[in-house]
Amino acid sequence: MSRAWIADDERSVRFVLAEGLGDAGFETRVFGSGAELLDALADDRPDVVFTDVRMPGIDGLELLRRLRARAPGLPVVVISAYTDVASTSAAFRDGAFDFLSKPFDLDHAVALARRAVAARADIGASPTIVGPDRPGAEEPELLGDSPAMREVFRAIGRVAPTRVHVLVTGETGTGKELVARALHRHSPRAQGPFVALNTAAIPAELLESELFGHEAGAFTGANRRHVGRFEQAAGGTLFLDEIGDMPAALQTRLLRVLAEGEFYRVGGRELIRADVRIVAATHQDLEARVASGDFRADLLHRLDVVRIALPRLAERRTDIPLLAGRFLDRACAELGVEPKRFDAGALAWLADQPWPGNVRQLENACRRVAVMAAGSPVGAAEVRAALGDRQPAVAPESADGETWTGALAAWARRELESGASDLHPRARAELDRVLLAAALEATHGHRQAAAGRLGLGRNTVTRKLGPRRRRSGNG
């Protein structure tokens, strides 16, 4: 019979977990502190340990470290009601088998115990990967206690100490760069540089030089050597945002660098090693872009070793009061206005909004409230008045009351019934065409203004429209 030990200062947690594991066939022992469990190691050894993080005296993370020293290979499951990047990363970095969030599902806890016992022989006494300490480092603003965000924190904690490349997906404004920074901060590369590049914001003809650098004289205007982002990120992490917009030729070169770990500067002959971890991000469906021929399948496989998918804000509404409170506090401090807080009605109203722009839109709304609201506490009516015409919008309706998403769904059903298989690229192309045409009409053909109205970079609009046509006439 496998033996499971449980350390938790809450009697109810010890009882429930011990009963559940006992019913599943485990022999259990319970301890009210980490010190009690360590004392018991002198005479006995369990097959798996469950430990709470926050306990008086020796806390769960310190217990984990001591168990790693005294009983290498013993799987330890860390339990905590405080599931954030710092605690999950610390647990995995110190060798935890897994992380269990409170309140937990008892069947899940039993399954974890069985997996831990089955895997014990394979775990062995492998060395712990410890990232460098960074005293005073500020934690990125990745906040949330919803189930969806707990899964994100758990994924970051498990992946950060490794060397694998990571693909972060999610809609615009969900916090993809914050995930990349958290992966870097909690990795063994944390004392190295974190370098970010939005590949959609750089003109295609300059992107190669921006990534890999160039030698003096490599092309017209290259008057001196330029060190690219890969060299700048040596020993650290390179974050490539909007990777789905990377031109095909650059995709091929990036694939070669990932496969071989070396590259040449543009116009150079010196072979340079690329000691860089890649975290890529996109809001696009890369599988669909592979199917349409716009993205290389082999590059996707190289980047997508581990994928972390960020939820839309609408999928984690319980986090909105926490986020809004933090954003309002920070905005007041940054803008030099008197501190404010939302009342319960305002928080309820904010949590009920659609937030199509996700966390970024909520943060901008809180900055506006910080400036426009007269006093504190800020009520729902004051929030609506402060946001004015910038309130989160629902799906627009056509003249007959039908939403455009409803019309899109009807079109998709018709196409699928007819046997079509290329819906996504055609729909995206038509969406781009309609939005660009409307924005250019509204801005009288001004591309930069149209890009701003659409929330896109000017280069993205230029690339979608193609080369600028020469105007005829005298205008």
Image (spheres, helix red, strand yellow):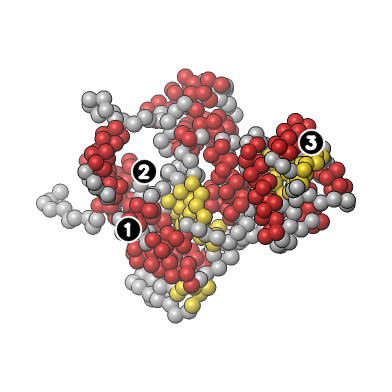
Mark 3 is surrounded, within 10 Å at the Cα level, by few (under 14), some (14 to 19) or many (20 or more) other residues, namely many
Q: Residue at x 46, y 49 (%)?
A: 169
14 relative to 131, above or below: above
Residue named by callout 1:
294
Mark 1 is surrounded, within 10 Å at the Cα level, by few (under 14), some (14 to 19) or many (20 or more) other residues, namely some
Secondary element type, mark 2: loop
The amino acid beneath tag 2 is: Gly
Whether residue 179 is visible, yes or no, is yes
Do the residues under discs 2 and 1 have CB atoms within 8 angstroms?
A: no
Location of residue 448 in the rendering, given as x and y in whole percent from the top left corner: 31, 48
Location of residue 356 in the rendering, given as x and y in whole percent from the top left corner: 41, 35
Q: Is residue 36 left or right of residue 469?
A: right
Q: Earlier in the sequence, mark 3 or mark 1?
A: 3
Location of residue 14 in the rendering, given as x and y in whole percent from the top left corner: 76, 35
The amino acid beneath tag 1 is: Asp
Location of residue 375 in the rendering, given as x and y in whole percent from the top left corner: 55, 22
Do the residues under discs 3 and 2 have CB atoms within 8 angstroms?
A: no
Q: Residue at x 79, y 36 (%)?
A: 9
> In the figure, residue 58 lies in which quadrant?
top right
Q: Along the line of sight, which residue is nearer the eye, 24 or 135? A: 24
Q: CA distance from mark 3 to mark 1?
A: 55 Å
Which numbered tag is attached to residue 455? Answer: 2
Residue named by callout 3:
9
Whether residue 332 is visible, yes or no, is no
The amino acid beneath tag 3 is: Asp
